[in-house]
Amino acid sequence: LASGNCRMKISLLDYGAGNVRSLRNALNAIGVDVEDITSPEQILSAGVLLFPGVGSFGNCMSVLKEKGYIEPLRAYIRANRPFLGICLGMQTLFDESEESPGVRGLEIIPGRVERFRVTELAVPQIGWNGLIPQQESPLLSALKPEDAVYFVHSFRVPPSANLGEWTLCETRYGETFVSGVARGNVAAVQFHPEKSGQAGLDLLAAFATSVSSHATVCRAPTEVLRKPESSCGYCKRIVACLDVRANDSGDLVVTKGDQYDVREKAGDVRNLGKPVSLARRYYEEGADEITFLNITGFRECPLTDLPMLQVLTEASRHIFVPLTVGGGIRDMVDANGIKSSALQVADAYFRAGADKISIGGDAVDAARDWLEHGRRGSSSIESISRVYGRQAVVVSIDPRRVWVSADDNAAGHPLADHSERSCRGPAGETHCWYECTVQGGRKGSGLDVIQVATAVEALGAGELLVNCIDADGQNSGFEMPLLNMVKEVVSIPVIASSGAGNAQHFVDVFKQTTAEAALAASIFHRKQVAIQEVKQVVVSHGISVRRSIVSRTPSRCPLVESHLPVWPTFLKSCATANAKILVLGSAAIVVATALMLVSRRGFAVRLTYCKL
């Protein structure tokens, strides 16, 4: 995407909500420079415009109006100038949204954005899903049929004849919805390409290449394509978790506890590696998401110097799957007496590269307040979800078993039956209830897991991370009774955590519960089980997961079909990396010409011909 010393430039409309750092990093990774839009005049003068959006429809349109962006944005798009909207950036192209009654969108495409109507699946849809092409486009040509991309949304565009030629692709999630629109030089997608691994980078590169070669993003087909077999479908997620804390020397390390105890017998903090290095390794091994749990909170640090901000900033430069961060996301006062709200702390994390934040002990306090007084609008869950959308808020629950000999001893708490499992209470009890804990599992709350789960969903949580103190570090499998108990009472996605010891445990949790994702830490840290091994075993049992490829063979690079001046810079990068390029068919002529240009610039070139 560069010719000589000139790099392509894309203007980014950052209206101040969510993680745009990852999009900047993704664009830089494919050789594109980014210019931030800071005034309405810049919109009209932009050569190529990207509009990413997260949060609520109404809040987004309100900010666009306040900044004076609405009319310039409408004029730019209606002039058929190069444009790519992402997630909420697609939804705002429509007339209105059920999410924010009475608020008008940009009114570029006729139609209304509506909430998912599915009842058998969790909402929001959080995770990887496939695409069903509806028309030809350079954007989709960059993807393989088995590729999955990352979605995170509660509202979607239903298929409609009123969309005409706008529908680019559709996706199935209990129902069919429009996952991409395109016409002429204007395109938008419901998913996040910057969080879709190599498939997303390929799509962004295809968009940039089509613009740089003056090709339209979408060519109106003579016949609409309908290939439902092309979609890999909704995928279960394999999540790698890193518990991060400062050791006794003040260095940030990844650690792992045994029932939440992270110290070795000698007293030192268990050190399993550096956070960014491990996270990058997990991305390259195929993790679908990566979660950083800041288990010490760093409560004394000023907001602008939180150590986890540095971790996120560096990790997001190399990792193009969703990043979640938890720990210390609450109202805080630093050592200088400066107060910061939970929303301000979350905003700092989002701006540093996080896609979701995870709230722990503060969520238990909010649940208690909701159970006693109802919704007040002041909790961290409510304030953050109101601005960024519920899909950006994960609540991490840390329950422990409380064994009882009879129902009467449970004080009305729902019981889990372990009679068919090997675990027993200290006196041989087979029934227990699950008490949610705070302060890293050291203190009970008196609230059971059902009370907390239903309360935080009502307050605006979009996902639950369900741990189990008793199973933590035991490598004996996930706590199935707990997970099934939670899934019965909530409609939001659940991530199973605590207890994974081998690949079969992931099969078991997906077969025996309806959890959308499963998380592990120590078995990945210690290389007891590889992420790819987990995925292979899960797939062998008929469970769909994302096919995780961090890099493609160069023959699939979208630059093969682009204009000739791009090739010398591209091949120069390949030569620096000692790469080998396989080229098939007529593209060999283009490559041969480019290789001659490269050789004239002092690079050694060796051609190997093979007959297939």
Image (spheres, rainbow, N blue to C red):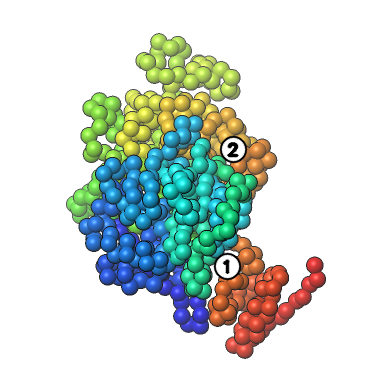
- Locate the C terminus and report the quarter of the image it occupies: bottom right
Give the percent coordinates (x, y) of residue 334: 24, 51
Tell me the residue that label 2 is attached to.
506
How far apart are the alpha carbons under marks 1 and 2?
36 Å
Mark identifier at residue 473: none
Tell me the residue that label 1 is attached to.
558
**230 lies left or right of 9:** right
Give the percent coordinates (x, y) of residue 310: 38, 59
Check disc 2 and report its element: helix, strand or loop.
Answer: helix
Q: Nearer the viewer, residue 439 or 202?
A: 202
Residue 413, placed above or below residue 379: above
Residue 543, placed above or below residue 608: above
Residue under the point 59% across and 49% down? 226
Q: Nearer the viewer, residue 356 or 598?
A: 598
Residue 388 visible, this orientation: no
Spot the residue most to the left: 337
Give the percent coordinates (x, y) of residue 488: 46, 26
Residue 51 visible, this orientation: yes
Residue under the point 27% across and 30% down? 370
| 1 vs 2, front mark | 1
- Residue type of the residue flagged with mark 1: Pro
In which image quadrant can residue 386 be found? top left
What is the number of callouts on the image?
2
Residue 323, placed above or below residue 82: above
